[in-house]
Image (cartoon, helix red, strand yellow):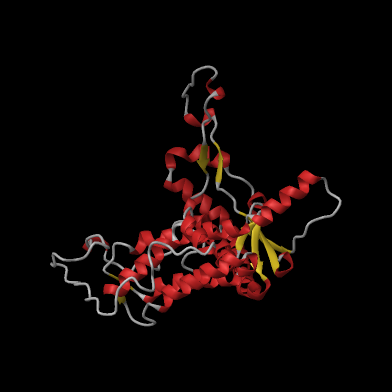
Amino acid sequence: MLENLYLIHLDVKIWSGRRKLRLEDLHGVRLPEGADKVASLGSKKVISPEELLIFSRLKNRAERACREVGVRFLGGVAVPKERFQEALGPLNEAKAQFDEETRKFLSRYEQACDEWVRANPEWMEVLDRARVEKQYVSNALDFSFQVFQARAVGGLDEESGAAFTKAVNSLPEQLFQEIAADAQILWERTSAKDKVTQRAVTVVRRLHKKLQGLAMLDAGIGKSANWVERGLNALPKAGNVEGNDLRAFCALVLVMQDKDALLRIAQGEEPETNIAGIFPADAPELPLEEDSSDSGPALAPKDDSTDTDTENEEPPLEKAVGWFF
């Protein structure tokens, strides 16, 4: 199995733009004696955080590119050989853009620091004192990645060998956990809508493709992939998804965001929500009028204040796993 996987290890360094806040920065404020035992003063921003956002976005984009096709493993992402190029292209693009953004940022570093001081004149002395050399910042910004393969090493003690075996054997469950996390984000973005676009369905297609690509990890993963495929086949291939199709879509995503349900499918059990037969052929279409009192139980009332096409928005960095790429 491991011979069919490449491990990608991202090594991205991003300067925080912060320095430790010191007592002398607080203009005579005095702390109780011994306060440093239970609390710290935190940090001060020596440059506008907006200047550094692009680097976090590029790191996030690279991580998503890997996780779209692979699964977390040994501090990196295990990617099937057959899909390695799908991750390598975006990685090279992210690195090239990261290097270019680093060059541009360093070229205006002093100017950016001066602008931050002017925007916070009451902290001028503190910020000037906290400014670091450009070379320090240059060393704190770097984007690289390594590609390798993992295999067990013979002759190790029993405990070390067991730890590696455990990590390998946990790959299927880790995969289902990642699928469920991505599906949960999709559920949060779409479950209250009265229709979704094909972009939302494309997310499920990508998760299905991820399951297919990693099916060599365990026979049950192929069963889960086949189950998701049956659900996708019941959905329209073009146009908006609404009415009964939307309820089938929501049922599919609802099951996928449950890791335990995916594990049960992998073990050959059919979930309580049967996607292929959720409605009989002669089932009436759900009414979609906003003033209808018979809107069905599956969806929350429409909120006009949020009626925007958000299912393809990039999620917050802390939530991003492998969602909309």
Q: Please state the horizontal and vertical placement of residue 237, each as a whole percent of the image.
A: 39, 82
Q: Residue furthest front?
A: 269
Please indicate, yes or no, whether residue 188 appears anywhere in the rendered image. Answer: yes
Is 41 or 180 nearer to us in this picture?
Answer: 180
Count of residue discs: 0
Q: Which one is in front, 253 or 17?
A: 253
Task: Indicate the position of residue 175 as horizontal and vertical percent values.
Answer: 57, 60
**In this view, which residue lies farthest toward the right?**
155
Identify which residue is drawn at 48% across, 63% down. 269
* Left or right, 273 with reference to 177: left
Q: What is the quadrant of residue 235 in the picture?
A: bottom left
In this view, the residue in front, 123 or 148, is 148
**Side of 278 where 88 appears, left or right:** right
Image location of residue 144, percent across then percent down = 68, 61
Q: Is 243 in front, or is 320?
A: 243
The image quarter in which residue 271 lies: bottom left
Residue at 58% x, 44% y: name it: 131
Q: Position of residue 273 (x, y in %)?
A: 37, 64
Which corner quadrant holds the N terminus? bottom right
- Residue 284: name its quadrant: bottom left
Position above or below: 237 against 38: below
Furthest-top residue in this view: 33
Q: Looking at the picture, does residue 257 appear above or below residue 24?
A: below
Image: 158 above or below 261: above
Whether residue 105 can be seen here = no
